[in-house]
Amino acid sequence: MFDKLKAHKDRFLELETELSKSEVVTNQELFKTLNKEYSSLTETVQKYDEYMDNAAQIEDLKLMAEDDDAEIAAMAKEELGELTEANEALTEELKILLLPKDPNDDKNVVLEIRAGTGGEEAALFGGNLLRMYTRYAERGGFGIERLSSNVTELGGVKEMTLLISGKGAYSRLKYESGVHRVQRVPETESQGRIHTSAATVAVLPEAEDVDIEISPNDLRIDVYRSSGNGGQSVNTTDSAVRITHEPSGLVVTCQDEKSQLKNKDKAMKVLKARLYDIAKQEQDKELSESRKSQVGSGDRSERIRTYNYPQGRVTDHRISLTLYKLEAFLDGDMNEMIDALILEEKTKALSAQEA
């Protein structure tokens, strides 16, 4: 472990020197690449430095603990115990920091919400999820852009696709993929009975051009007139875009913008993310052992969470964690749950590595 940490430190110092060179600073592509690697090593190197500083102090304190002066020896022993305990904790942190990182963690996210069984109530719950993720993005300083939408007259969401951008967006939101279930009394329910409905969430890392190549010959692009609720015309030009990727059969539509060009650009972002996700899932199947260390499979058919309104609770079934703060959670206060999911994944990965 410490050989690897020493190599990380050497590379960190090497990058520090490279990033100060004028020829690197003026080469934006190279500077961006090196700075990304530098940033990825920073936390590990800082923890390693802290560990080494403590280790040096521990050796000094061991000598002081043998001092003839009883008071000095007692103080040294007390401080020695504290530093030894601190370094044991740092060792565990360093083990986790050395775990292989998901290469997609720093990417932007294409997040899709689809109402499931439950009719209008499911769509209204989809709207609740939309607000939850929007508020979470705002709280976390992430950018948020609506790529496509299909909403109901009552404000529900049948389908919604968002682009959530910012460093670490995927690392925080990737655990949201799956079926979200809600239990509550619908506003339209006169008998006061609790209904159960669901919405499906898909979280895809935004694909960059270097991640996936799409041949223009594989695409069929249709344009048509946008329409709103009830079939009303949104505008009088053929601005809506439907892109069909013929080899996979994937179809993406976008009609939110008045500009055909903007709709096409947004639809391509969604298409690239979906194709990248398919390729990623195929790769994950080949790496089945590593999949076992993840929190759940991330499968969109897997029920991951229940939002119970009468009891004011939200329960994540993958880690059996229940929080009695449903209102705050739906207002985007999700970090406690996400942090617990991240810790669980890292703990399992560490156990698998040590087994």
Image (tube, helix red, strand yellow):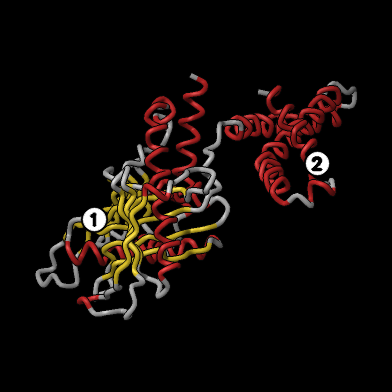
**Closer-to-camera residue (273/316):** 273
Q: Is residue 109 left or right of residue 181?
A: right
Q: At label 2, which amino acid type do we have?
A: Glu
Query: Disc 1 on helix, strand or loop?
Result: strand
- Neighbor class of circle 1 (other Cα within 10 Å; few <14, some 14-19, many 20+) is many
Q: Is residue 13 above or below residue 55?
A: below
Cα–Cα gap, marks 2 and 1: 52 Å
Q: Earlier in the sequence, mark 2 or mark 1?
A: 2
Q: Nearer the viewer, residue 58 or 153?
A: 153
Point out the residue furthest to the top here: 355
Q: Among all residues in the image, which is located at the extreme left?
A: 191
Q: Determine which of the numbered discs, if any, sits on residue 264 in the image.
A: none
Q: Is residue 85 left or right of residue 198?
A: right
Image coordinates for residue 235, horizontal then vertical, percent:
33, 80
Task: Determine the residue positioned at 22% across, 56% down.
Answer: 116
Q: Quadrant of residue 57?
A: top right
In the drawing, what numbered circle is on residue 18? 2
Q: Position of residue 300 (x, y in %)?
A: 30, 45
Up the image or down, 333 lies above or below 21; here it is below
Residue 198 is marked as 1
Instruction: Using the rendered image of the protein, determine whether residue 328 is visible from the camera's viewpoint.
Output: no
Instruction: Give the structural element (helix, strand or loop) at label 2.
Output: helix
On the question of residue 300 being in view, the answer is yes
How far from the left and from the top, in percent, is residue 72? 86, 31
Q: Which quarter shows the N terminus?
A: top right
Residue at position x 32%, y 80% in the image: 236
Residue 319 position in % (x across, y down): 37, 40
Tell me the amino acid under the disc marked 1: Ala
Query: Mark 2 touching mark 1, by CB under 8 A?
Result: no
Residue 148: quadrant of the picture: bottom left
Give above or below for 295 relative to 253: above
